[in-house]
Image (tube, rainbow, N blue to C red):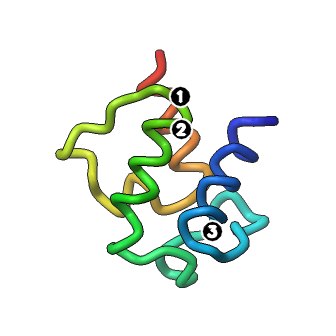
Amino acid sequence: MTLQERIQAIIRSVAQKPAPADPEESLFESGILDSFALPDMVSAIEKEFGIQVPDADLNPRKFDSVARIASYIENRAS
């Protein structure tokens, strides 16, 4: 399973909606996620990838698309 597939699985689980096919599509503008779902999604990302997301990073812009989430995880893991 690729990094993006793992992220899409988390989005499906948290949002109870299908993840977008386009990794650049905004999760918030498209209505897949809202600000209330952000903490749940970040918590699931932390568990899945074994990273800590500092409170300062709890910003919808950092987690706005599958591509941005993947980039964030890659940067945190290195």
Is residue 67 depicted above or below 61 in this figure? above
Q: Could you tell me which residue is drawn at 77 percent across and 36 percent down?
A: 2
Tell me the amino acid under the disc marked 1: Glu
**Residue 70, horizontal then vertical, whole percent:** 58, 41
Q: Position of residue 78 (x, y in %)?
A: 47, 15
As measured in the structure, the alpha-carbon distance from the residue carrying label 1 to the one carrying label 3 is: 19 Å
Say few, some or many: other residues with alpha carbon within 10 Å of mark 1 (under 14 / 14 to 19 / 20 or more).
Answer: few
Label 1: which residue? 74
Please name whichever residue, 58 or 44, is drawn nearer the observer in this view of the structure. Answer: 44
x%, y% of residue 7? Answer: 63, 48
75 lies left or right of 70: left
Three-letter code, disc 2? Ser
- Could you classify mark 3 by the number of other residues whose Cα lies within 10 Å: few (under 14), some (14-19), or many (20 or more)? some
Residue contact at pointers 3 and 2, CB within 8 angstroms: no
Q: Secondary structure at mark 2?
A: helix
Task: Tell me, for residue 71, which label it has, or none.
Answer: 2
**What is the number of the mark on residue 34?**
none
Q: Which residue is mark 3?
A: 25
Please name the residue shown 29% across and 57% down the image: 59
Q: What quarter of the picture does the N terminus occupy?
A: top right
What secondary structure is found at the residue carrying circle 1?
Answer: helix
- Amino acid on which the number 3 mark rests in the picture: Glu
Q: Which comes sooner in the sequence, label 3 or label 2? A: 3
In the shown orientation, is residue 9 left or right of residue 49? right
Task: Give residue 21's position: percent from left, percent from top.
Answer: 78, 65
Crowd class of label 2 (few under 14; some 14 to 19; many from 20; radius 10 Å): some
Nearest to N terminus: mark 1 or mark 3: 3
Q: Is residue 17 above or below residue 49?
A: below
Report if the CB atoms under discs 2 and 1 are less than 8 Å apart: yes
Relative to 18, does residue 43 appear above or below in the rendering? above
Q: Residue at x 63, y 68 (%)?
A: 25
Residue 3, quarter of the rendered image: top right
